Amino acid sequence: MRILKWTLLAWLVAAPALAEIKRDHHSAARLDEVRIKHLYLDLDVQFDKQQLAGFADLSLDWKKPDAGRLDLDTRDLSIDRVLVKTDAGKWHRASFTLGSRNAIKGQALTIRFAGHPNLVRVYYRTSPKASGLQWLSPEQTLGKQKPFMFSQAQAAHARSFVPLQDTPAVRFTYSAHVTAPQGIRVVMSADNDPNATGAGGYRFNMPQPIPSYLLAIAAGDLAFQSIGPRSGVYTEPGRLAAAAKEFEDTEAMIAATERLYGPYRWGRYDLLILPPSFPFGGMENPRLSFITPTVIAGDKSLVSLIAHELAHSWSGNLVTNESWEHIWLNEGFTSYVENRIVEAVFGQNQAKMEQVISQRELMAELKELPAPDQRLVVDLAGRDPDDGLSGVPYDKGQWLLRTIEKRLGRDTFDPILREWFDSHAFQSVGTDEFLNFFGTRIFDKHDAAFPRLEVEEWLYQPGLPASAPLTAAPAFDVVDAARTDFLAGAKSAAALQAGSWVTQQWLHFLNELPTDLSQDKLADLDAAYHLSDTKNAEIAMRWFLAGIRAGYEPIRAPMRAHLIGIGRRKLMMPLWGELAKTPAGKAWAREVYQVARPGYHPIAQASVDAVLK
């Protein structure tokens, strides 16, 4: 009943185009009173203390004449003092208070004024336990010689390393001056000079307005190699050649996306390949996507992740969800564009295989999710916004857009989607604006091929509509036939002749194995294809999952190395979850986790802590 009421309300009283929200319940910011318009950071990277220290200058755009306060988001920051700059150019101390700590929001920093200053300076230090930063010792890096630090701000972790209005509803430009120990290169989600020496510190500028979750910084032993006229790779020297080779098609991806959806508006598109403890596959930080090394498979079979992060340069970075309840506007659109890029660069065969995998994995995930979290527009009131990061906004969102495309045809849908990006560039929007925009062009037309009632079902109802079309991938026919023969005992593993399968075929084969597969069957597969020793992390995770369910002991040693060496949530959370289902599995998992946990990012630690309690 609550869903039906919500749906009707969204339909009948949709907000005017680009109406600004006054509050984001994950932020202390009073958006109707004042907004940050530019951020300047002056920071020192202190590895010995595991902290960033310095100040943030906040240029303000006052919206309300009688407002006399600025409310900022912080989490575990030490605030040393706050200054305001007068019209005469002089700095004066301002009074401030830190609110009580909230487990989700952190602490509100409230600064009070007489008048409306245009510039506020906050001197602060981060905590070694900042939720958005990970500090790695030299031993935890590939080179073993120098320490490494990187940030992860999405969804609400920027507040743990910068005091600011930490909501996607606020966009600001930024610049920075950052110092670090000699021999450590600093990079940010801004213009990075590969020839910079760091003498006198590193300087950055981001002229396009971004939301806070796209603020990013990293520091370590980093080398650079160009891979195109406007793209290159930063990573540890020992990983540089492999990364540059794996991602050499990046420029082709940029060009393909421009042909579909308009110009790339961010200048350069570089990649930072992080240590394997990075908790996500990638993070779309503008101008410098942060990427896990687990996608370096040696055969380019996993580079659709690069297509995904690049696609965010249109969907997400350019047109942004105004709050995390609407994250499907970022991730669903991006997953759709990602697949179009893969099709344009690597062919329809690979694109269809990846569609099938995402659909099948979503259907499996929906069986485990509570009904409210199966909706595209999810209720996150009182919850951590990270709770919205399931496969639903990604795969169900993509499925919705692909369904619209099939009904209308690409000749009709592509120009409308391009117009969406052009007309909403550098703006933050909600689902109401999606309904307004696509409603006038698609949903509300007489005899609409995709009527509004149907899109409302996708947005506000759990599960998948009965009309959701399943994709077929001809390349999986041989895989399905082989699996059937193998399970029936008609063929041994070696007789399947699966050695020539591409990664996507292996993922489909392993995903569809029955959960009660015998140890003998797994041993036969292992003997034929050495799956326990695979270096492909995507295949390894699914193989280990099958092994846990069957009690197949030979996976234990390589799975232990996988869980300790990789902090990417997608590649380890299913394993921790499956191990936790039995007392023996949970006991073994806890022993391994004691070793693994110090090398995990705080976001990953929180996820595994919740599973293993």
Image: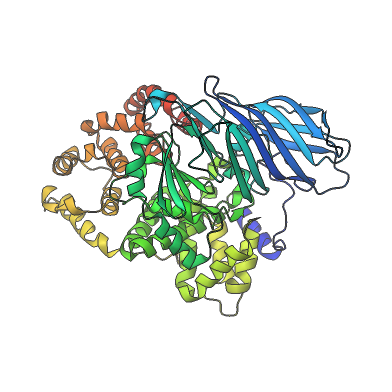
| On screen, residue 269 above or below 595 | below
Query: Is residue 598 among the parts visible in the rendering?
Result: yes
- Is residue 110 depicted above or below 404 in this figure? above
Tell me: residue 13, above or below residue 20.
Answer: below
Q: Is residue 601 left or right of residue 159?
A: left
Do we see residue 464 in this rendering? no
Q: Residue at 53%, 63% (x, y): give it.
A: 263
Residue 209 location in percent, x, y? 64, 50
At 47% across and 33% down in the image, what residue appears?
A: 604
595 and 59: which is toward the camera: 59
Q: Choose between 128 and 590: the one closer to the eye.
A: 128
Q: Observer-nearest residue: 512 or 17?
A: 17
Q: Answer with the quarter of the image where residue 569 lies.
A: top left
131 left or right, relative to 109: left
Q: Residue furthest top?
A: 48
| Residue plotted at (43% across, 35% down) | 222
| Colour theme | rainbow
* Near-viewer residue (62 or 544): 62
Residue 152 in percent (x, y) is at 53, 38
Q: Position of residue 44 (x, y in %)?
A: 59, 28
Q: Residue furthest bottom?
A: 446
Which image quarter: residue 90? top right
